[in-house]
Amino acid sequence: MFNDISVIIMAGGKTKPAWQEQGIEHPSLADVNGIPMISRVVSSFVDAGVTDTIVLTGVPKIAEMVADCCQVIADEGDIIRNIESALRAAKNDLIILSSSDLPCLTSKVARDWLEQCRRENDIDFIYPIASLLSCQKAFPGVKRTTIPVRDGSYTGGNILMVRRNFLLANLDLARCFFESRKNPLALAKLLGYWISLRLVLKMLIHWFPLAPSIHQLEVRFGQIAHCRVKTLKCDPIIATDADTPEQLTEILEIVKRGGV
């Protein structure tokens, strides 16, 4: 059982036109083998032994679907305010933030990841990463964003761990990172131009020898946030979300053929 962990599942935000064109009100309502994706994600955590599960959503159908087993927090139209509301409703200091569009998540994968996070009892923030090689092996052909570092190429996962009190005290910093995530110059300013330049050069020149390591990035993020940061390698399933209907179809076809 995970009585000491609260899971917050993010099922808010605007729905992309590609989903709306398919008649799907929100990506997490997309069908995965006869079950809405949000139900699969919630069940994975509940069946893994989580006793405090919170769903953030502005979609009445989702709220109704999960009301029996989760707390429901209404989407206020601002992701940081949403997270703050969910943090204040959570019963525990150890928080898992999960996306709702993980079509292959299972209770075993969720349980294994929660156990990994729980063992890191002196860390404030854990970010999951999966190697490009492991993702290509599990989900061949699925496109994903990767960052090349000295240790190899990695993609980020979609189930983070954070300490509630730490995040509540650093919501402004969280907003800076969120708003900068698609602005390379703003992100470079946060990280520092030297480390950002080394990342860019590694992207352009495969053999570039001065690329930062994962540990150096952990240290830099820790310096920025004044906290203890750690990356943990995760199952490729945690790093595989369905961003579009086409991507969901592609992922499910791979599973159908015996992948993962």
Image (cartoon, grey):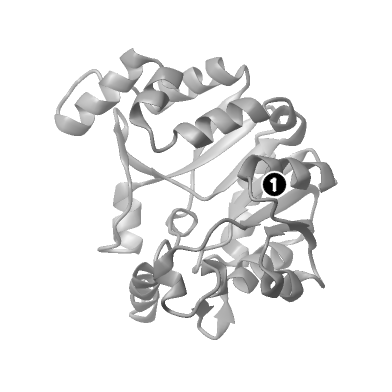
Q: Note whether 193 is above or below 124 in the view shown.
A: above
Q: Note whether 57 is above or below 259 in the view shown.
A: above
Which quadrant holds residue 99?
A: bottom right
User: What residue appears at the point 34 percent right and 71 percent down from the top-left corner?
Assistant: 246
Rendering coords of residue 169 (x, y %): 73, 25
Q: Is residue 192 left or right of residue 170?
A: left
Q: Is residue 115 visible?
A: yes
Q: Could you say which is closer to the camera, residue 227 or residue 84? A: 84
User: What residue appears at the point 17 percent right and 24 percent down from the top-left corner?
Assistant: 208
Give the residue at mark 1. Answer: 82
Q: Is residue 89 left or right of residue 59?
A: right
Q: Is residue 123 visible?
A: no
Q: Could you say which is closer to the camera, residue 50 or residue 182? A: 182
Residue furthest bottom as drawn: 34
User: What residue appears at the point 69 percent right and 55 percent down from the top-left corner?
Assistant: 75
How many dots with numbers? 1
Which quadrant holds residue 42?
A: bottom right
User: What residue appears at the point 55 percent right and 73 percent down from the top-left corner?
Assistant: 25
Which quadrant holds residue 223?
A: top right
Q: Is residue 42 left or right of residue 69?
A: left
Q: Note whether 199 is above or below 77 in the view shown.
A: above
Rendering coords of residue 118 (x, y %): 69, 42
Q: Could you say which is closer to the camera, residue 189 or residue 194? A: 189
- Please name the amino acid that badge 1 sits on: Asn
Tag 1's secondary structure?
helix
